[in-house]
């Protein structure tokens, strides 16, 4: 697992109530967005639009994105848009934009495991670690505008 991600994933799991693969996907999406736009801790201008299905387990990713970006529904810096994929758009006020999405090909391979019902918590955590350690270029697509 990317050691830079570990503390954010821990915080996110604590906030979210459990550790699961979609939460980790969200953390990684948020992390990439912040890194690619060069967002600094004090940069209050970041806005995020999360584009995904607003139902569990997909919506678990929202908490991951919020934790990694500090853009939340509560502070008004995150918007939600319904989408069949899992993605987020990051914007700075000076107009820079980036979109990060889960690679549909990678998701197709993981889908059966990620979406099966009644998975024991231990297995869910295993999947979370799997998703946390997958190479970024395999799991995500990054688009700049
Ligand atoms: Zn969850």
Image (cartoon, rainbow, N blue to C red):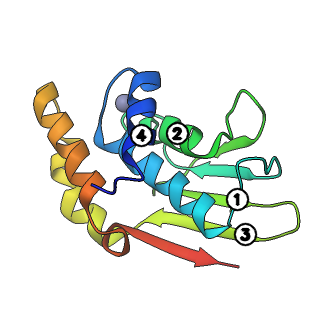
Badge 3: residue crowd in 10 Å (few <14, some 14–19, many ≥20): some
Q: Residue, x 46% and y 47% (percent of image)?
A: 26
Q: Using the image as rendered, state which of residue 108 and residue 142 is in the foreground.
A: 142
The mark total stands at: 4
- Report the quarter where the C terminus lies: bottom right
* Mark 3 element type: strand
Mark 2 surroundings: few (<14), some (14-19) or many (≥20) residues within 10 A: many
Residue in the image at 19% along x and 45% along y = 127
Q: Position of residue 77 (x, y in %)?
A: 76, 41
Q: Position of residue 56 (x, y in %)?
A: 39, 32
Q: Earlier in the sequence, mark 3 or mark 1?
A: 1
Q: Position of residue 39 (x, y in %)?
A: 70, 59
Mark 1 and mark 4 lie on one chain; the one further toward the N terminus is: 4
Contact, mark 3 vs mark 4 (Cβ under 8 Å): no
Identify the residue position indicated by label 2 in the image.
62
Q: Nearer the viewer, residue 39 or 97?
A: 39
Mark 3 or 4, closer to the camera = 4
**Which element is circle 2 on?**
helix
**In the rendered image, which residue does mark 4 sit on?**
7
Q: Earlier in the sequence, mark 3 or mark 4?
A: 4
100, 136: nearer the viewer:
136
Q: Earlier in the sequence, mark 2 or mark 4?
A: 4
- Look at mark 3 in the image and give the residue it sits on: 97
Residue indicated by mark 1: 39
Cα–Cα span, label 3 and label 4:
26 Å
> Element type at marker 1?
loop
Q: Is 83 drawn above or below residue 20 in the view shown?
A: below
* 12 horizontally vs 97: left or right: left
Between the C-alphas of marks 3 and 2, the distance is 19 Å
Residue 137 quadrant? bottom left
Query: On the rendering, which quadrant does ligand 1 occupy?
Result: top left
């Amino acid at each position: 697992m990317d050691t830079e991600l570990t503390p954010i994933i821990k915080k996110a799991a604590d906030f979210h109530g459990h550790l699961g693969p979609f939460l980790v996907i969200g953390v990684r999406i948020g992390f990439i967005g912040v890194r690619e736009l060069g967002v600094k801790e004090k940069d209050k201008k970041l806005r995020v639009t999360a584009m995904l299905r607003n139902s569990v387990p997909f919506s678990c990713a929202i908490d991951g994105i919020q934790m990694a970006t500090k853009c939340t529904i509560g502070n008004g810096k995150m918007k939600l848009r319904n989408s069949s994929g899992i993605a987020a758009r990051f914007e700075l006020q000076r107009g820079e934009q980036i979109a990060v999405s889960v690679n549909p090909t990678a998701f197709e391979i993981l889908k059966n495991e990620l979406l099966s019902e009644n998975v024991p918590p231990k297995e869910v955590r295993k999947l979370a670690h799997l998703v946390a350690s997958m190479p970024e270029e395999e799991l995500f697509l990054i688009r700049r505008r």
